[in-house]
Image (cartoon, helix red, strand yellow):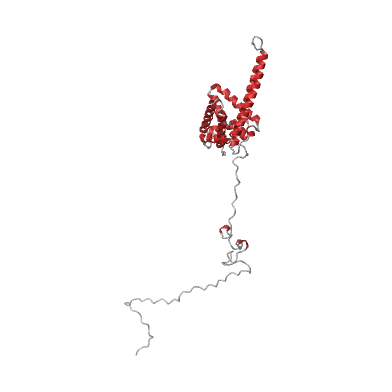
Amino acid sequence: MSENHPEEPDRPTPSDPQVPAPPPAQPPFQPPAQPPVQPPVQPPGAPPAGGYPPPGAPPTPGGYPPPAQPNQQPNQQPYAQPGYPPPAQPQQPYQQPYAQAGYPPPPAAYGPGAAMNQVPVGEAFTYGWNKFTQNVGVILLAALTYIAIFTVVTIIFFTILVGTAAATTDAYGNISGGGAVGFGFGMIVFIIIAVVLASLVQAGIIRGSLIATQGRPLVYQDFFRFANVGTVILTALLVGLATAILSITFIGGIVFAFFAQFALFFVIDKQLGAIDSITASFRLVYANLATAVLLFIGVYIAEFIGSLLFGVGLLIAIPVAMIASAYVYRRLIGEHPV
């Protein structure tokens, strides 16, 4: 009799290979659903987001963009946007080259190593000749006036001196002691007056020459008007005295006259004092030695040639040389003769 047993599942035998069971099927990946983004609600009349009107919208009054909203970053460069002009740049004030009108450049401009203009001396004498021929009548009239004044003063003094000597001379032709003292004193006074007159003549020609470089025609009064006669005479006396004293060494007087050749130009043109004008002349000449040497030599050559024609040639040589000197002076201090 057979027993009834429940059926057992088939078991794999040791000789059967192990077969893994397939993994359960997974459902496809689905991203989580996002809530719909709602656009921000703009209040009535407010500009759109971004601070600028949409394309095609009429521009705002004045052409400027509306102000930024509190939640927006401020625009760092408003002038970079269309319709917004760049800010005005501050203008630097114009600086005058010289602080005082009518005063020469600072003394440093005349010192050693100053970058000054080199002026062709031949060009200066050509300029002087042209200006002389354009104003020849008034120049000769002024020169003849100075010559007449000097001649009259000389005749008067020599008449006084000769009369004094004759009145103090005895029958044997011996002059008394008082007469000798009076004659010597009269000669000193005459020399001083002659130097003063020569200084005024030179200053008058220089003044006319400086006016000629300004481009206007000369008139007769230009040679006789001086705003600072005392300074003109003092400067001429100082230059003449220093030149005479240094002439003991022969070369010393020439050197001093060379460096002081522009002293009266500074007195008349820039209204400087006697010492300041001499100092300014020394600095200007030292900074422009080549030009100053050629001008100094050219002036003396012109005057020497003029003196050969019985002195008559000086009526031409001196004005031409002075106008040439005024031309060089203007150029060296940075001005432009007309």
Quarter of the N terminus within the rendering: bottom left
Q: Is 29 placed above or below 273 here? A: below
Q: Is residue 125 left or right of residue 70?
A: left
Quick one: 229 or 66, which is closer to the camera? 229
Q: Is residue 163 visible?
A: yes
Q: Looking at the rendering, which quadrant does residue 323 occupy?
A: top right
Residue that lies at the very extreme toward the bottom in this rendered image: 1
Place of residue 3 in the rendered image (x, y in percent of width and height, measured from the top left): 36, 88
How many marks on residues? Answer: 0
Quarter of the C terminus within the rendering: top right
Q: Is residue 189 visible?
A: no
The residue sitting at 55% across, 23% down in the picture is: 247
Residue that lies at the very extreme toward the left in this rendered image: 15
Residue that lies at the very extreme toward the front in this rendered image: 137
The residue sitting at 65% across, 24% down in the picture is: 153
Quick one: 212 or 328, which is closer to the camera? 212
Q: Is 201 placed above or below 19 here? A: above
Q: Is 209 placed above or below 153 here? A: below
Quick one: 149 or 4, which is closer to the camera? 149
Q: Looking at the rendering, which quadrant does residue 68 occupy?
A: bottom right
The residue sitting at 59% across, 25% down in the picture is: 240
Place of residue 297 in the rendered image (x, y in percent of width and height, measured from the top left): 52, 29
Q: Is 331 placed above or below 84 here? A: above
Place of residue 14 in the rendered image (x, y in percent of width and height, measured from the top left): 33, 77
Place of residue 46 in the rendered image (x, y in percent of width and height, measured from the top left): 62, 67
